[in-house]
Image: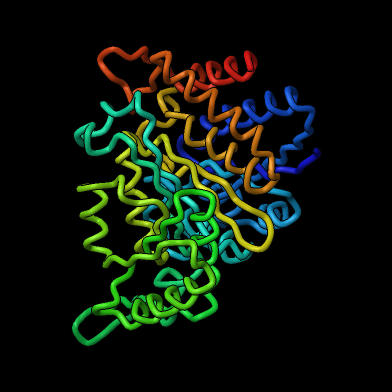
Amino acid sequence: MKARIAVLPGDGIGPEVMPQALQALEAIAKQFGHSFEFRHADVGGAAIDKTGRPLPDDTLKLAKESDAILLGAVGGYKWEGLAYDVRPERALLGLREQLGLFANLRPAKLYPMLADASTLKPEVIIGTDLLVVRELTGGIYFGKPKGIEKTADGERGVNTEVYTTPEIVRIAKVAFEAARKRRKKVMSVDKANVLESSELWRRVVIGVAKDYPDIELSHLYVDNCAMQLIRNPKQFDVLVTTNLFGDILSDEAAMLTGSIGMLPSASIGSGVGMYEPIHGSAPDIAGKDIANPIATIASAAMMLSYSFNLDQEAAAIERAIVRVLEQGYRTKDIQSPTGKLVGTQEMGRLIRAELGKA
């Protein structure tokens, strides 16, 4: 197949980890006879430095005209003093909104050989394999009114949590469909005991569940879910939740796997999908060749599967990652006393070498 992929390296470690994913894709293309056209553009802080805007029109146009988007990371200390509406992170919100990317899929699966990289006991986390389905274009990040206004006593900050029935229905369907390909369990996470938006969320999810009689539906309040993720993460299969709760819980789930540098994500909707590691720009380690590229490479694998239905090719990348880890190679974030410490570029090369063996 032929595919056009928008490449948005972004900031911090983004430009370091992105080439490793692209080279893995090139290896896949050569091995399976595909053709991937990579088209680069600036986003986030890099775009601000050049154009004054985190999401330039040309970048958005490229994204819309591509078959999929691979994104590195955005943000950093350099731009923290800017107004909220022009900070690098606004590029992510803009892409999600403009492309209709309403569902964020964040798998958290522990590789057994990395159990010692987590701060939790091995007997608690070994066997963890869950998927967080986060609603991405609604909720408190987009609700209005919002902003900071002056008052007689100083200032007042306002954000609004808003959800509609159609928004909840479509994200619930994504979760139930995902569960059908896994262990057929969905946990809906809300705060229905105190939030009206969550009361509606729970009621609508229960209604959608009637169309999926083969799926077991349960509910947890978000505070209890946060505790249960640490207490017994193996109980979870698919978690579906709001934008804010999903943002927090998916980062918590990331640490079950030993490092946030291990986890990919997919943002999907009705058109072009966007794939990115969830680790952020990590400006403190940028340029040092110590960042873990596995999350970005795994994000490319998710792109092959979700956007192009190339499940065999995605599985090949995942197997290559596992084989490298089995051989004891580790980047700094997952280093163990017996591990073989390697840098960003070397980890990418090792994974490509395993792809070549396959």
Q: Position of residue 301 (x, y in %)?
A: 59, 37
Vertical order, 326 against 101 (above or below): above
Q: Position of residue 268 (x, y in %)?
A: 59, 57
* Image quadrant where one finds the C terminus: top right
Asked if one can make out residue 155 in the rendered structure from this viewpoint, the answer is no
> What residue is shown at x 33% (from left), y 56% (from top)?
248
* Image quadrant where one finds the N terminus: top right
Vertical order, 65 against 159 (above or below): above
> What residue is shown at x 78% (from left), y 32% (from top)?
34
| Number of marks in the rendered image | 0
Farthest bottom residue? 152
> What residue is shown at x 29% (from left), y 47% (from top)?
233
Q: Position of residue 335 (x, y in %)?
A: 31, 21
In the shown orientation, is residue 148 left or right of residue 275? left
Q: Position of residue 165 (x, y in %)?
A: 50, 81
Which colour scheme appears in the figure?
Answer: rainbow
The front one of 28 and 129 is 129
In the shown orientation, is residue 210 left or right of residue 336? right
The front one of 280 and 123 is 123
Quarter occupied by residue 173: bottom right
